[in-house]
């Protein structure tokens, strides 16, 4: 695999990989964030360039800590390229704890076998999800004007509130993640009369919309609908892809995004895995 190091090569890859959306959208999102100077902890590798068959992103090589878990994912035009990649210890560091992010469920068996060969244990980190994209945010319903003055952006002072109510947050790692998302990526929130956020939505580093939440006493007022619409149009204006992943058990969010025009990407079921070497102990 060839690591892309120059800005021009990454810009070329960003342009070329757009041809393979929506299946390549998560990798595309990471490349976009790197090219915009929002991410510095990841590197991009391809099997060949500029004519690639497989693209991989991963954390930069460093001593693993809880603060900097090793993350990776890949997109391929040729499924036969996946097994050689997974078995290449120069690319996939099986001796570390690995967070596989947004991998298509169809590759589950290959990853499981590769982990077994490398004396690692694989476990699911979350649920099967839908990958949903919005083709044209301009077609979304018009915004309600009665709450327009209360729509704002989150500030770093709101990070603890967001982290505390995030399903995958609640700890120091989650807090740092939320701070980074607020600082570097599009978001919006709706404020109560005292100026406190009561509903919000953020953007992941791979450019997916997420962390949508409304405090219980303010639900059933269509706040989430307004914020999804606001953020989608903002992301379109900024040149981001407009998409999200929704766990298949999250029926309320699925119904909301479907109502607003998001469509499932057929044949792609994103999943998150954690691989731990057998020598790892808690």
Image (cartoon, rainbow, N blue to C red):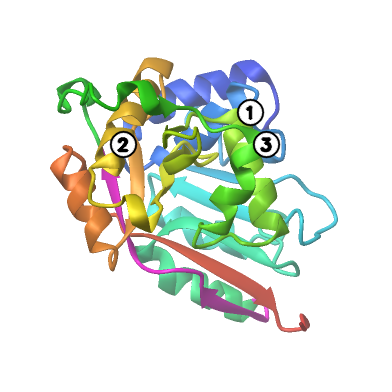
- The region drawn magenta spans 118-133
Mark 1 secondary-structure assignment: loop
| Disc on res. 214 | none
Left or right relative to 227: residue 240: right
Q: Which quadrant of the view contains residue 216? A: bottom left
First along the sequence among labels 1 and 2:
1
Residue behind mark 1 = 38
Other residues around mark 3 within 10 Å, as few (<14) / some (14–19) / many (≥20): some
Judged by depth in the image, the label closer to the viewer, 1 or 2, is 2
Q: Which quadrant of the view contains residue 130? A: bottom left
247 is higher (above) or lower (below) than 239: below
Residue behind mark 3 = 3
Say if mark 3 contacts mark 2, CB within 8 Å: no
Any part of residue 70 in sight: no
User: Any magenta on residue 132?
Assistant: yes
What distance separates the C-alpha of mark 1 from that of mark 2?
A: 22 Å
First along the sequence among labels 3 and 1:
3
For the residue pair 67 and 73, the one nearer the viewer reads as 67
Identify the residue at image location x=51%, y=57%.
Answer: 166
Mark 3 secondary-structure assignment: strand
């Amino acid at each position: 695999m060839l690591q892309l190091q120059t800005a021009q090569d990454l810009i070329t890859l960003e342009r070329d990989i757009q041809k393979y959306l929506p299946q390549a959208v998560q990798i595309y999102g990471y490349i976009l964030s790197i090219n915009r100077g929002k991410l510095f902890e990841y590197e991009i590798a391809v099997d060949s360039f500029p004519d690639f068959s497989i693209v991989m992103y991963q954390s930069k090589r460093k001593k693993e800590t809880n603060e900097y878990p090793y993350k990776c994912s890949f997109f391929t035009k040729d499924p036969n390229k996946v097994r050689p990649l997974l078995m290449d210890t120069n690319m996939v560091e099986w001796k570390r704890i690995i967070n596989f992010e947004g991998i298509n469920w169809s590759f589950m068996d290959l990853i499981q076998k590769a982990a077994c060969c490398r004396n690692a244990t694989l476990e699911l980190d979350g649920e099967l999800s839908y990958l949903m994209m919005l083709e044209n945010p301009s077609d979304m319903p018009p915004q309600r004007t009665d709450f327009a003055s209360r729509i704002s952006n989150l500030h770093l002072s709101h990070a603890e509130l967001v982290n505390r109510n995030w399903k995958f947050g609640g700890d120091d790692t989650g807090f740092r993640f939320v701070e980074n998302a607020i600082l570097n990526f599009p978001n919006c929130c709706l404020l109560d009369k005292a100026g406190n956020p009561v509903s919000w939505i953020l953007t992941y580093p791979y450019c997916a919309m997420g962390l949508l939440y409304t405090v219980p006493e303010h639900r059933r007022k269509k706040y989430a609908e307004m914020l999804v619409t606001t953020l989608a149009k903002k992301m379109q204006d900024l040149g981001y892809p407009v998409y999200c992943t929704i766990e298949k058990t999250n029926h309320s969010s699925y119904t909301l995004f479907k109502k607003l025009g998001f469509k499932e990407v057929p044949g792609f079921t994103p999943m998150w895995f954690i691989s731990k070497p057998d020598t790892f102990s808690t």
